[in-house]
Structure formats: C-alpha cells, structure tokens
Amino acid sequence: MNSILSFKIAIQTFKDNFKTTIILTGLFGIMAVVYAGMFPSFKDLLDQMAESGGLDPFSSFFGPAAMDMNSYVGFLYLEMYQIFIIIILAIVIGFIASSIVSKEVELKTIDLFMSNPVSRKQIIFEKFIGLIPMVLIINFITMIAIIFTTSAIGETLDFGYLFLTHIILIPYLLAIVAIGILISVIIDEKMKGAIIMIAVIIAMYVYQTMGQMISSLEFIKYFSLMYYTNAYEVLKFGKVDVAGFIILSTATILLLIITMIYFEHKDLRL
C-alpha cells in the first residue's frame, strides 16, 4: 500500500525532466514576450491588410481568427497559441512522452521498475502523473509572461479570458501526453516513437485544416484533437467549449486505460 501511495516513479519522472522543463519554460516564456511585444510594430500593416482584404486568404487555413489578425487577440492567438503552443509545444511534449517508457526498455532499466512491488499499470499511471508538472509549469509561466508583456506595451486583453484559455489547453496537452505514452509502450525504440508522435500531431493539424477548407472533407477535422481546443473563442470571447473539454479529458482517460492494458500484456524483452 505504501508503494502505491508514495508516487516514487512519478517523482523520479518529474526529476528526470526537471532541467528540460526549466529550459522549455524559459524558451516559451521568451517567445511569449517576443511575439506579444511585436504587435505594436505590425499593427498598422495589419490594419492596412484588413482594409484591403489581404487577410481573407488566411481564413481558409486559420479560420475566423485570421480575419481578426489586426487585433491584439487575433495576432496573439495566431502567432503564439496556434503555432507555438497548439503545434510546437504539443510536438515537444509529445516527443518527450513518446520515449518515456521505450527509453527504459532500450537502456534495460525497465527491469528495475519490474523488480519493485508495483504493477505495470501503476508504472504507466505514474509516468503520466510525472509529466503533468511539466505541462502546468510551461503553460502557466507562458501565461504570466503574456500578462506582463501585455501590460508593458499598453494593449488590452481580458486576463480572465486568458486564464480560461490556459485552463482549456491543459486537457489538450495531457491528451498529447497520453498519446505519446501509448506510442512509447507500443514502439520500443524511442526515436521511432518520437517520429511517429510528430507525424501524428502534423496529421491532426492537416485534418483540421483540410476539414475547414474542403466541405466534402469536413468530417476529418473531428479526428484532430486541435479541433476540440478552440482557444481563439476563449481568448476573444471567453466562450468555453465544454463539450470539447469533456471530449479531450475522456480521450486522455481512454488512452491511458488502453496503454495500461496493452503494457500489462506486452512481452518485454529484458
């Protein structure tokens, strides 16, 4: 019972990724400052593009937010959230998660876990728990960096909506972590797993984009986790997609259950 409640594997997972967490937090915090701080320099140009209809072609790729790109919220969403958090941060976190178990198998350290009185299900669960602090720290430090930069440049942003935006990003990023851990369990070679994880995220972006652009392919956007995030609506209007939040949370739980069942029955070559 003590081993179940100690969360030793989760704590060790957090420690193993602590330096990476600090580095990524710094990088994404800097990117938040840079991109939020750039808006005043681009505002006049974006206003001219909006008046001349120059933003119209972007709506096919980026949806309604593209037409609002000359506003601070639209610019911040497209440049920071859509690119650096929803895509790039997802790739980075997914990359880490996709090797969380496979690296133990490659390095032959998985037998250390197996020699302790813990089940395979607990190993998966605690590996997942151990990555949650990374997601939370990067997510909310980035938010704080945006708050300070917004105040510094004198722009208007509803910080309540901003907080909600970062709340709804959590189930999306945790779903990415869950996909990564599943891949890590299925693929024993961490680099192969990482490549597959990156391909999955890119595929989800393509599905969402194609679903928006081509009416006959609209159904494929439902296969993308990005579709259920809808951070722009939250950042702009404070409108939370509760159904999307539930779907992402449910997907995370189901992915973890599938991973636990698969790992429980997998033949490990120790």
Image (cartoon, rainbow, N blue to C red):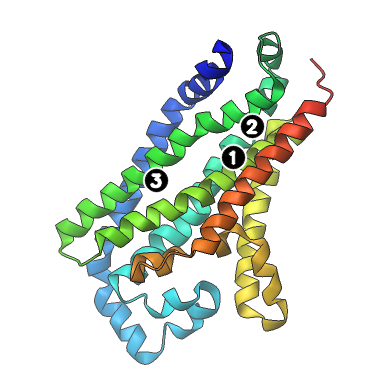
Q: Please state the horizontal and vertical placement of residue 53, each as a whole percent of the image.
A: 41, 89
Q: In the picture shown, does residue 221 fall above or below 51? A: above
In which quadrant will I find the C terminus? top right
In the image, residue 209 lies at what x, y percent?
Answer: 60, 70
Query: Marks 1 and 2: in contact by CB < 8 Å?
Result: yes
Image vertical order of residue 244 relative to residue 127, above or below: below
Q: Residue 95 carries which label?
A: 1
Q: Which mark is residue 142?
A: none
In space, the residues marked 2 and 1 are separated at their CA atoms by 7 Å
Can you identify the residue that label 2 sits on? 99
Q: Can residue 187 be seen in this view?
A: no
Is 72 located above or below residue 171 in the figure? below
Local SS, label 3: helix
Rendered residue at 69%/28% (across/down)? 102
How far apart in space, not on screen, are marks 3 and 1 (Cα)? 17 Å
Which residue appears at 33% of the width and 90% of the height? Answer: 51
Amino acid type for the residue under numbered disc 1: Phe
In the displayed orientation, state which residue is furthest to the front.
1
Judging by the rendered image, the residue that carries numbered circle 3 is: 139
Disc 3 or 1, which lies upstream in sequence?
Answer: 1
Mark 2 residue crowding within 10 angstroms, few (<14) / some (14–19) / many (20+): many
In the image, 73 versus 165, the foreground residue is 165
Which residue is more in the foreground, 269 or 237?
A: 237
**Would you identify the image quadrant in which residue 108 lies?**
top right
Viewer-side residue, 161 vs 213? 161
Residue farthest to the bottom? 52
